[in-house]
Each structure stands twice: as structure tokens, then as C-alpha cells.
Image (spheres, rainbow, N blue to C red):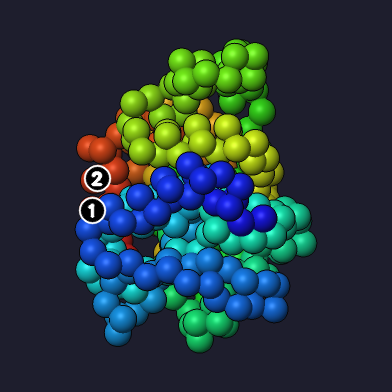
Amino acid sequence: MNATLLSPELNQQYQQQWHSLPEEVQGSYVNTHLGPVWVMEAGPKDAPPLIALHGLHTPAPFNLELLWPLTQHFRVISPDIPGQAGKTPGLAPVPSHQAYAMWLDQIMDAYGIDKCPMVGLSFGGAVLLDYAVLHPQRITTASLIVPAGFFRPLWRPLKKLFMPLVGFKLNTDRMHFDSLMKPLMGDNWSALEQYYYSVFMAGIPMTLIPPGPFAIEQLLDFKAPVQLFVAEEDVYFAPDKLIEKSRKALQNLVEVHRIDDLHIPNQQHRLLIQKEVTRFMLNN
């Protein structure tokens, strides 16, 4: 499923976000044994590679905006994850048996990357951890931004999202959609909220179950330094629980940053994340 083909509006917004980025960004399909993968790249062609894994229905153009300062130092490679609202065709992999990790392994091999740093946002954090179980030696440094993969939340998102979701399903208008998005992102990123709205209106199914949860027994060989960001008002992951689970699963967690914001942070906190991720990647 190339989701952008299901909705002209979704495709238009994808292209608009792509071309709003500060400099030229390349996009192309990379052939793997698991099928074609749409990948976007930014940064000097001769710079060291960095893999950036996006969150749920937050494909490469938005992921690159979030991490743009890294493109000054790295060739940032951001694939659209299959089963999400991007341009990679195919259904979502099963969340077990390292299916996402094997998909990412194909991308690494297609680019001839032996090992590199990685950044995982939300759902992409769980994909990064899946890869850390399969090939821990191929990740040199990792930044996890409000990541899935350490536990599967239930009551926290159910409590905050169930009634707004029911309201939107009954009315399918923008007012009720804004109410649904408020606990997730408030007014933090209007272009991304509009993209999410188009995803819902196109009837694209949600890929709600990421890989994991992962325990230290699975990650014993993962020795790269890890940086973690948690959000105090995260609709999915209670920050104290996320920190606790991360510390128990990762022997190499060297930094924890608490952001007083929602799961999708405002521009001020996005700038802070950019600064801290760039520093961490360059120093490790």
C-alpha cells in the first residue's frame, strides 16, 4: 500500500512538506528482497550516514524537518515504514520475530552501510530497538525520542483518546478531529495535524502495535550509547514508567531528557531536541 496513492490530498500534502524543507532533499525507491522502500535523503552526499526512523503516520518529510540540523553533519536517510501513511508499498510487518528489523537490515545492505548512528521517534524507536536485538553491532549511537518498544500502554491512551475518537467517528468533522489531536499534539504542528486528518479521511488503517516490548535479556549485546527523551504530558507513555523500563532494558542509557510537553512537542521543544540529538551524535 502506497498510502499517498489513496488520496490526492494526502499526496499533495506529502509533496508540499517535502518541498518546504530548507534545502534539496532526494527521494527514491530502494529495491530490497522485501520489496521497494521509499527513502528520502538529506545532507552532504559524502557525509557519514545516519538512519532516522519516523513515528506513526509521520513519514519521511516530517521526520526530516524534526531532525534537520543533523543534515549539516550526516547524510540523513529516512525510509517510509511499510504499513504507515507514506510512499512505501506493502502491509505493515508483524511486530514479532524481528520482522521490522529484517526490513531495516535490507535498507542498510542496500545502501552498503556496515554500521551507523540511528534516531527513532515514537513507533520508530521500537523499530530501532528491534534492530538492536537482531544486529546490535550495526548501531553506533542511538537517540530514542518518546519511544515505543519498552512497554505497551493501554489505560493512559484509552482514558485520554477514547471519547474524542468516538466523537470523531460519529461526526468526522474538523472540530472533533481537533479534539482528538489535542491530547497528542495540542496546537504544536499544524502541517502534521493536517496530514493526520487526511490520513483519517482517506481511511488508512492505524498500525497500532509496534515491535516489543524488549527486555535486557534481548539487548545484552547492544552496547552503543543511548539518549532518551520523555514527555511529561505524553498521551501514550507515562514518563516515569518509560524511564524506569528503559533503565531496566538498556545497560548503555547515558542521557535522559524530560520535556515538559505533549507526545508531539511544540516548536521550542523541537528545537531543543534538535540541539541535544545533534550534540549527542557528534560527541559519541
How far separated are the C-alphas under marks 1 and 2? Answer: 5 Å
Is the residue 45 above or below the residue 246 in the image? below
Q: Residue at x 23, y 37 (%)?
A: 268
Q: Which residue is mark 1?
A: 275
Q: Are marks 1 and 2 in contact (CB under 8 Å)?
A: yes
Give left or right: position of 145 versus 241.
left
- On the rendered image, what quadrant is the N terminus found in? bottom right
Residue 216 x %, y %: 63, 56
Q: Which mark is residue 81?
A: none
159 or 1, which lies in front? 1
Above or below, 118 relative to 248: below
Residue extending furthest front?
8
Identify residue type, mark 1: Lys
Q: Secondary structure at mark 2?
A: helix
Q: Nearer the viewer, residue 101 or 140?
A: 101
Quarter of the image where one finds residue 261? top left
Of 6 and 150, which appears nearest the observer?
Answer: 6
Q: Where does the C terminus fall, quadrant-wise? A: bottom left
Q: Place residue 78 in its image quadrant.
A: bottom left
Check disc 2 and report the residue beneath it. Answer: 272
Q: Looking at the picture, how far across and down is residue 99, in whole percent?
A: 72, 63
The structure residue drawn at horizontal position 42% and vertical position 33%, both measured from the top left corner, is 193
Residue at image location 22% in from the left, 68% down from the top: 72
Q: Nearer the viewer, residue 174 or 83?
A: 174
The amino acid pointed to by label 2 is Leu
Residue 91's place in the image compared with 261, above or below, is: below
In the displayed structure image, the side of residue 246 where residue 73 appears, left or right: left
> Image quadrant of residue 205?
top right
Residue 159 visible in the shown view: no
Q: Secondary structure at mark 1?
A: helix
* Pointer 1 local density, CA inside 10 Å: few below 14, some 14–19, many at least 20: some
Please provide percent x and percent y for residue 203: 65, 36
